Amino acid sequence: MKELKKKKFMKNFVKNFPISLDEIDNRLIMESESDIELFKKFMKISEKLTADLQLDAELGKKYLEHFILANKQNRRKILELHTYLQNQIPETRKDLKKLSKEILISWYTGIVKVNGISRLVTYSGSHTWTKLKGIKPHGICGGRFGYWSRRQKIS
């Protein structure tokens, strides 16, 4: 059996490989850039729906992951939904209306449905607790003992 030298083996391997290493690097960059763009668009949609410009980015990443897990088509739908940020979603696009409602509900409940099963993404970080005044999650104290007996200051 003829022994191949390392250099010749690598040359043959690279020559017969379906795509070049440069193409692999470019594909990885493109995927990561498109993921970054998708995330930015998801956050813009979320900001518009919640009327909150200071959403938690880490929480947004988790929600986005769950929405994509729930339905691979959501990646495309989020990009489409972003095009309607300034305009009303047409009545014919009930799928986008449903997705926007699910995004809003997820921010307020901390829950995303994946394959019909509710998945908790956050409990204490949901908008129910962080945006509504005077409401604290169960198990988290709202202040010193007796804080509930005094009227809250309205800012």
Image (cartoon, rainbow, N blue to C red):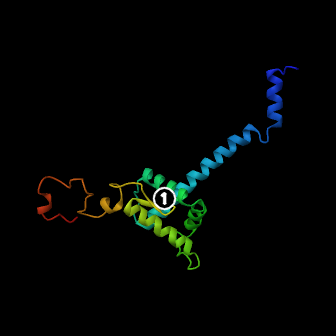
Horizontal side of 4 relative to 27 (left or right) equals: right
How many circles with numbers are drawn on the protein? 1
The residue sitting at 17% across, 63% down in the picture is 153
Vertical placement of 76 versus 141: above or below?
below
Q: Residues within 10 Å of mark 1 (few under 14, many from 20)?
A: many
Is the C terminus in the top left, top right, bottom left or bottom right quadrant? bottom left
Farthest-out residue, bottom: 91
How far across and down, in percent of the image, does residue 72 sit? 59, 59
Horizontal side of 100 relative to 145 (left or right) equals: right
Q: Is 110 in front, or is 39?
A: 110
Q: Secondary structure at mark 1?
A: helix
Q: Is 20 in front, or is 140?
A: 140
Horizontal side of 90 relative to 124 (left or right) equals: right
How far across and down, in percent of the image, does residue 148 sit? 15, 61
- Residue labelled with disc 1: 43
Vertical placement of 2 versus 140: above or below?
above
How far across and down, in percent of the image, does residue 146 sit? 11, 57
The residue sitting at 25% across, 57% down in the picture is 138
The residue sitting at 47% across, 56% down in the picture is 63
The residue sitting at 58% across, 65% down in the picture is 77
Q: Is 19 in front, or is 109?
A: 109
Quadrant housing residue 137: bottom left
Quadrant housing residue 121: bottom left
Is the N terminus in the top left, top right, bottom left or bottom right quadrant? top right
The amino acid type, in three-letter code, at marker 1 is Met
How far across and down, in percent of the image, does residue 61 sit? 48, 52
Horizontal side of 33 relative to 2 (left or right) equals: left
Vertical placement of 49 versus 130: above or below?
below
